[in-house]
Amino acid sequence: MPFPERLTKGYRTFLAGRFASERARYQELAGLGQSPSIMVVGCVDSRVSPEVIFDAAPGELLVARNVANLVPRYEPGGGQHGASAALEFAVRALKVRHIIVLGHAFCGGIKAFASDDAPLTSSDFIGKWMSQIAPAAEAIGPKNGEAEEAYLRKLEFASVELSLKNLMTFPFVLSAVDKGELSLHGAYFGVASGRLLVRNERTGVFEPVGD
Ligand SMILES: [Zn+2]
């Protein structure tokens, strides 16, 4: 099958539009290298592109996306730790000032964890990857007759909380936060409403912003 026509068309639009208008910025970034001050850990979900949601220009956001926007616990040795490598690059090499864990509504990864239906069982890659949110599920307790959607939403918030906790298990994150050089934030995008909630650092409540 040929390269998707949709992409060639989109690229032409980009080249004539955004690239043309931001050519100087691209050239400067190529010469000086990138120095984004913000890292976003987002989900692979096609509806939740951080650059789109935050209206970001090239070079502004270092984005690491994985299934369900998870930050694993610090685990040196063994395994190919893609998420941790991106984090290390952002904090140690680029010295970002902020890390945002961006959760979202209707997350397929979270749903897969909660339902454990075929073909996404605990023996698949997604099942194994998502098993790391077990502590988040424990924290919110069992479903107890709650509506599915309400439970999944709680689990989506709790998994952002867990990722924020896991971030602090990385020695270089802990040290940068302690020195006041790095702040960690939780956020949540409501796909249908377009509403962005940001976690209040003091209360832990996700509150709307930008209204
Ligand atoms: Zn997701």
Image: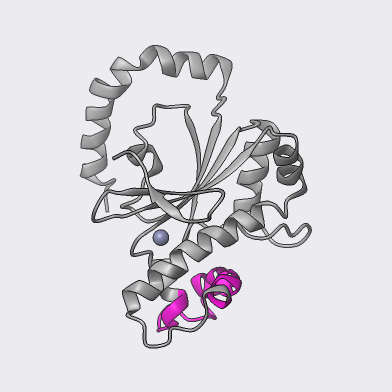
Q: Left or right: where does residue 191 sit relative to residue 200? A: left
Question: Picture coordinates of residue 103 (x, y %)?
Answer: 44, 55
Farthest-out residue, front: 203
Secondary structure that dominates the magenta span = helix
Task: Work out whether residue 161 or residue 48 is closer to the camera in this orientation and state it.
Answer: 161
Q: How many marks?
A: 0
- Name the quadrant of the N terminus: bottom left
- Residue placed at 54% from the left, 28% from the top? 36
Q: Left or right: where does residue 10 sit relative to residue 199? A: left
- Residue placed at 50% from the left, 19% from the top? 29
Q: Is residue 202 above or below residue 110?
A: above
Task: Work out whether residue 28 or residue 158 is closer to the camera in this orientation and state it.
Answer: 158
Q: Is residue 203 above or below residue 156?
A: above
Q: Left or right: where does residue 86 sit relative to residue 207? A: right
- Residue placed at 32% from the left, 80% from the top? 147
Residue bounds of the magenta highlight: 113-138
Q: Quadrant of ligand 1?
A: bottom left
Question: Picture coordinates of residue 135 (x, y %)?
Answer: 61, 72
Farthest-out residue, bottom: 145
Question: Picture coordinates of residue 80 (x, y %)?
Answer: 66, 58
Q: Is residue 194 above or below residue 122?
A: above
Residue 153 on the magenta segment: no
Q: Is residue 70 above or below residue 93?
A: below
Q: Residue 173 falls in which quadrant of the image?
A: top right
Question: Picture coordinates of residue 211 (x, y %)?
Answer: 28, 40
Task: Work out whether residue 82 or residue 167 is closer to the camera in this orientation and state it.
Answer: 167
Residue 124 on the magenta segment: yes
Q: Left or right: where does residue 169 sit relative to residue 64? A: right
